[in-house]
Image (cartoon, rainbow, N blue to C red):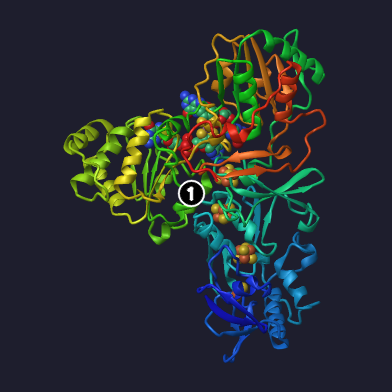
Amino acid sequence: MVQITINKQQIDVPEGTTVLRAAEMAGINIPHLCDHKELTPYGGCRLCIVEVQGIRVPMASCTLPVSNGLVVETETEALKKSRQFVLSMLFSERNHFCPFCQVSGGDCELQNAAYHEEMTHWPIQPGWSDFPVDTSHPYFVLDNNRCILCRRCVRACAEMAGNFTLSVAERGAKSMIVADTDIPLGESTCIKCGSCVQVCPTGALIDRTSAYQSHDKNLQEIKSVCVGCSVGCSIKIMVRDNRIVRIEGNWDGAVNHGAMCEHGRYHESNENRVRITTPLMKKNGKLEPVSWDEALSAVQEKMTKEGVAALASTRLSAETLAAFKDLFESKLHSKLVTSIEEGVPTAAVAKFAETHEGFEGKLDALKTADTVLCVGANVNRSHMVAGFLFKRNLNAGVNLINIDPDETSLDEVARVALKPKAGSDHLLILALQAVIAKEELERKSLNIKDADARIKKAIAETGISEADLTKAARMLAHAISPMIVFGKGVTAQRDEKLIEALYQLAVQVGAVDGERSNILSLKGEANSQSAALMGLDQPFNPNGEKVTYLAVGDDYVSKKLVEKTSKAEYLVVQASYESKLTEQADVVLPVSIWAEQEGHYINLDGRMRKTEKAVNAPENVRDNLDVLTELAKRMKLTLDADWKKSIRERKSSVALN
Ligand SMILES: Nc1nc2c(c(=O)[nH]1)N[C@H]1C(S)=C(S)[C@@H](COP(=O)(O)OP(=O)(O)OC[C@H]3O[C@@H](n4cnc5c(=O)[nH]c(N)nc54)[C@H](O)[C@@H]3O)O[C@H]1N2
Ligand SMILES: Nc1nc2c(c(=O)[nH]1)N[C@H]1C(S)=C(S)[C@@H](COP(=O)(O)OP(=O)(O)OC[C@H]3O[C@@H](n4cnc5c(=O)[nH]c(N)nc54)[C@H](O)[C@@H]3O)O[C@H]1N2
Ligand code: SF4
Ligand code: SF4
Ligand code: SF4
Ligand code: FES
Ligand SMILES: [Mo]
């Protein structure tokens, strides 16, 4: 700890803290623009200047590390004058005619800083010239005329998203934010995560969908968790008049620290499917609106008499999944009770966990890994924020080894891309182990006796050359902090032995060692892990049962599911949106979407968190859990499942916390 004095207040802060952050810890706000707590200090705007005893010139506090006995003043008359000058320069350089700007009036950090310094105008002639406005991006506009060159966006793109799309072109007053080699943003390598927009302190990066809709102070801010995938990013849902205006990453989120992906930030709030707003029943071959009473009576009558095959979405809350399991499995004794994922991303891992409880590690390990082995997981498409965690370090020398039969965009950033024949992963992993053993690079010996045979077999059957195999094996074995992640390319093989081989490889190279457990499967949807723990992971083959009950909620449905249920004798679909599935249903029960309900979720590395209700559902739409409870009640059944108990029925592959 280091002791410093800020505005006569003595405080103890950890070594390495900047004066700006130290002041913040003591509740003292030093005005700043280019600095952001989740980004590397840059020291460009000079607004954060402070007076340091013994030093003649003011110092930028955002790049000044604390040292013992440092005495700092943050609010003197001289500093105020200097800050007014700094701001005057910024305002006069480009077009800052605030009344025309969407962030003016509360959402602009530049304007707010000026008010803080009690400025009403700036005394310098504006001398701006025209800068380009880039409107080519689907989600935001870049207006360089409002840019103050703080480079927060450049740093966010690199340090949050690991995407390195943005940079500064030209020099001095002509400097400009550009994408790639100065091409339109909409045609660039941008992956549309929106991190740059979230950090921009001015109106230079403007969100298209929420522009001119309201100032932040008039928006309700509901802290919740994204249900876009199993990463489970912490979010803030910004709401006005029962409508989601915008979704932002929560800076305090333990998983994502503010970052989000396109799917979570934009898709989850900009829905274009058609909402179902009333119960429907098939009459003379056509779906017609009916009352809840009529719909539920019809369903209840069928379910009491006939066997039911039941399937639930893994986007539903743990409370709903537990009630679903209780109703169909415990109370109605249905033979087939499963989830929409059919255990494809989880069943093999859950099986392995029976003998290796809690063998999986935490996402955070990706942030410090020096070598990442990615097997059958396209983190450029699914679980994007998990990908961000190591892609940010690519420029710092992190090695990526990607194993995927298909060419994917992940190959572009991989040091080694192995393209084995689909389904040959087991042979390949065994061969990687063999090479590491043969070259005596093992951290822990696996006592491999058949190394040569393994290598020979893999070369013959996976299509991987000996040179590539050796290169990948050496890279992984030489890592100081290796991490293995795997996805559906692996788990869809439903082979517990393949999971075991990956685990052994992790042990062999020191990714798993004592407390360290740097191996992680990425799982599927938001509540993939809850469904797995409740044993909702059987393949869905509903032949034989008379009634099929699909609680899909607001999930997308695959063609496969539509086909599998096309011959159902009696099909009940509990859904929020119209689809081919609801078209073929006998009864459709309209239910709330993710933002209209609350409940618990377990993310891919075992974090248990609650999502909050942010908006009200349409009038005649009911909560997913309520529909199941009501159905049970009509059948004189009482649902008594406790989700916290239901998730303890099996050993978990990840530690729950
Ligand atoms: N944005 C977004 N995120 C999502 C989803 C979404 O729809 N959108 N969906 C969620 C869901 S439901 C799921 S299940 C997960 C899926 O997430 P992942 O588990 O990452 O699955 P995929 O993205 O399909 O990537 C699987 C990769 O495995 C490769 N592969 C196929 N066969 C083999 C093989 O035999 N061996 C190896 N090594 N690789 C193989 C495929 O080419 C593909 O690139 O993502 C979740 N996350
Ligand atoms: N054999 C086999 N069976 C499986 C799986 C498998 O890999 N193999 N996977 C299992 C898993 S993990 C799951 S989740 C299920 C369903 O998994 P899949 O069968 O893989 O279905 P999806 O591709 O996730 O999505 C269903 C449909 O919704 C559409 N869709 C998804 N997201 C969007 C979107 O954001 N916008 C629009 N407009 N359309 C979208 C897709 O185009 C697709 O047609 O199947 C499970 N069953
Ligand atoms: S949206 Fe994301 S990837 Fe695109 S420029 Fe902004 S930070 Fe970079
Ligand atoms: S676009 Fe915004 S975040 Fe980027 S440099 Fe300009 S003002 Fe800063
Ligand atoms: S990574 Fe997953 S949880 Fe995070 S924002 Fe994207 S979809 Fe949502
Ligand atoms: S905040 Fe310190 S120089 Fe910009
Ligand atoms: Mo999935």
> Label 1 is placed on what type of residue?
Leu
Residue 526 position within the rendered picture, expressed as x and y whole percent measured from the top left: 58, 38
**Can residue 419 be seen in this snapshot?**
no
Q: Quadrant of ligand 4?
A: bottom right
Secondary structure under the numbered disc 1 in the rendered image: loop
The residue under label 1 is 363
- For the point 64% across and 25% down, the residue is 324
Instruction: Give the percent coordinates (x, y) of residue 262.
Output: 59, 46
Mark 1 closeness class: few <14, some 14–19, many ≥20 residues within 10 Å: many
Image check: 80 left or right of 542?
right
Q: Residue at x 79, y 64 (%)?
A: 105
Q: Is residue 49 shown to the viewer in this render?
A: yes
* 201 over 53 or under it: above or below: above
Identify the residue shown where x is 74% and y is 69%. 111
Q: Is disc 1's CB within 8 Å of ligand 5? A: no
Q: Position of residue 44 (x, y in %)?
A: 58, 74
Q: How many marks?
A: 1
Q: Is residue 291 left or right of residue 88?
A: right
Quadrant hosting residue 338? top right
- In the visual, does 405 lie left or right of 362? left
Residue sitting at x 62%, y 51%: 136
Residue 542 versus residue 84 in the image, above or below: above
Q: Quadrant of residue 25?
A: bottom right
State the residue in front, 187 or 515: 515
Q: In the picture shown, does residue 203 fall above or below 340?
A: below
Question: How far across and how far down the image is residue 572, in percent?
Answer: 67, 17
